[in-house]
Image (cartoon, helix red, strand yellow):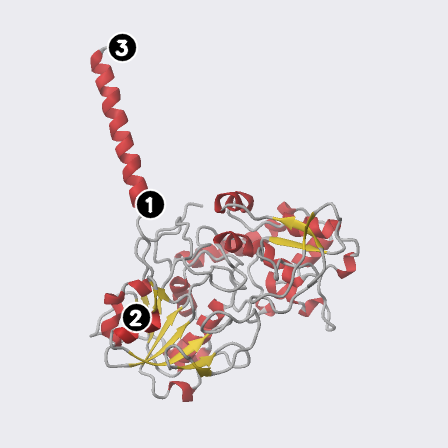
Amino acid sequence: MNQKRINMLRKFSFLFCLAIVAQLAFSQQTIMPGAARTQQYLPLLKGKKVGLFANHTSMVGNTHLVDTLKRSGVNVAMIFGPEHGFRGTADAGEKVGNYIDKASGIPVVSLYGSKRRPSAEDLKNIDVLVFDIQDVGVRFYTYISSLEEFMEAALIHNKPLIILDRPNPNGFYVDGPVLDTNYKSFVGMQPVPIVYGMTIGEYALMLAGEKWLSPEANKKHAHNITTNPTTDTPFHLLVIKNQNYDHNSKYVLPVKPSPNLPNIQSIYLYPSTCFFEGTTLSEGRGTDKPFMVFGAPSLPKNLYSFTPNPNDGAKSSKHFGKVCYGWDLSGTPEEVLKKTGNKIQLKWLMEAYRLFPDKEKFFSVPKSGMEKSFFNKLAGNNDLWQQIRDRQTEEEIRRSWQPDLDRFKTIRKKYLLYPDFTE
């Protein structure tokens, strides 16, 4: 090989290495949630009485948003809390009352339970509302339902709303059955798939843009929706965007979003394993691997074994104190991502049903019948349980989702604030 060719190869190799380094540097830029971009929204809060919807995930670096705002001279007059409470310690479904937060001295109004949106009385002395909650991008995780109720209250009572956007740890794909609104509940309020691939800010824009809110709220938002904050322009809805985020990002949450999603592995598995909440099987609550392990005492004893017991995140759940046999899907984040394959996996649910000895008791059926079951609320339809029972293949079930998924993807693209993943 002559020297000229050797020099050309060296030059090409050098340039190729530079390109790889540049790509890695770009992909490793620190993602900055909307809450951390304080210069974008603090001027809009100065001199105002602020109503803040937040919980333990509402962090700006190592400081809670409440403390960040107070140190900046912002008057946080009231805090609103979602499921699991403002401090994020309550069990799933546990009702939390109103109280005074000891750390900040600010009144906290619970918006989980019988009361799901601020009342006119709550908002009468509030000038502007702020929403900052870390979502996990799964339809039956109730924070997007809380967002919808909060938006409704803001629009109906003419209170400007600032949404501090946060990355979606499951924002790199879209999958699952689209909710049939006949099965609407607080674990699914809109016709979206289980994994909808949007940040909470994008989801808010879709709620408003598609007029999925109540008729009264839909009339109020008019055109005053923006992502460009200015003190001179009035707005009904303002989204403070993330920085350095796109829908290819694999964002690892710095704070666990709720007691039973302790790490990114549980968050990746949650869209697939939460189905077990609608069955007689334990979904791992009461263990150190919730949503990563699942099983029941009656499954074959040669399977993985675990014993759920009461803990701070699960004071009551299925099969406490009993040895359960089933599956352990835990591993490194990379191993778990490989298991999920960037889609909802039905094979674990289907195999559990195949091995379960008493098929009639696999799904948790209320007295009113399967139609009103929690499994149907999670699935968003009355089809999936029957497809599992009828032993349809995963491919057949997934094909039944596709027409509605395609329609949703067309809607979704209209409201994206960040570069999308390649499908």
Q: Position of residue 133 (x, y in %)?
A: 41, 67
Q: Position of residue 113 (x, y in %)?
A: 54, 78
Q: Which residue is mark 1?
A: 27
> How many C-alpha atoms fall within 10 Å of the one at disc 1: few (<14), some, or many (≥20)?
some
Do residues under tags 2 and 3 come within 8 Å of each other at their CB atoms?
Answer: no
Whether residue 278 is visible here, answered yes or no, is yes
The structure residue drawn at horizontal position 39% and vertical position 51%, both measured from the top left corner, is 247
The disc, 2 or 1, on the residue closer to the chain's N-terminal end is 1
284 on left or right of 80: right
Disc 1, SS: helix
Three-letter amino acid code of the residue under disc 1: Ser
Three-letter amino acid code of the residue under disc 2: Thr
Whether residue 213 is visible here, answered yes or no, is no
> Which quarter of the rendering shows the N terminus?
top left
Q: Position of residue 193 (x, y in %)?
A: 53, 58
Q: How many marks?
A: 3
Disc 2, SS: helix
The disc, 2 or 3, on the residue closer to the chain's N-terminal end is 3
Q: Which residue is mark 2?
A: 68
Three-letter amino acid code of the residue under disc 3: Met
> How many C-alpha atoms fall within 10 Å of the one at disc 2: few (<14), some, or many (≥20)?
some
Comparing labels 2 and 3, the label whose residue is closer to the camera:
2
Q: How far apart are the two marked residues, 2 and 3, measured between alpha carbons?
A: 64 Å
> How many C-alpha atoms fall within 10 Å of the one at disc 3: few (<14), some, or many (≥20)?
few
Q: Which residue is mark 3?
A: 1
The residue lying toward the viewer, choosing from 307 and 372, is 307
The structure residue drawn at horizontal position 38% and vertical position 66%, both measured from the top left corner, is 205
The residue lying toward the viewer, choosing from 216 and 287, is 287
The structure residue drawn at horizontal position 42% and vertical position 79%, both measured from the top left corner, is 101
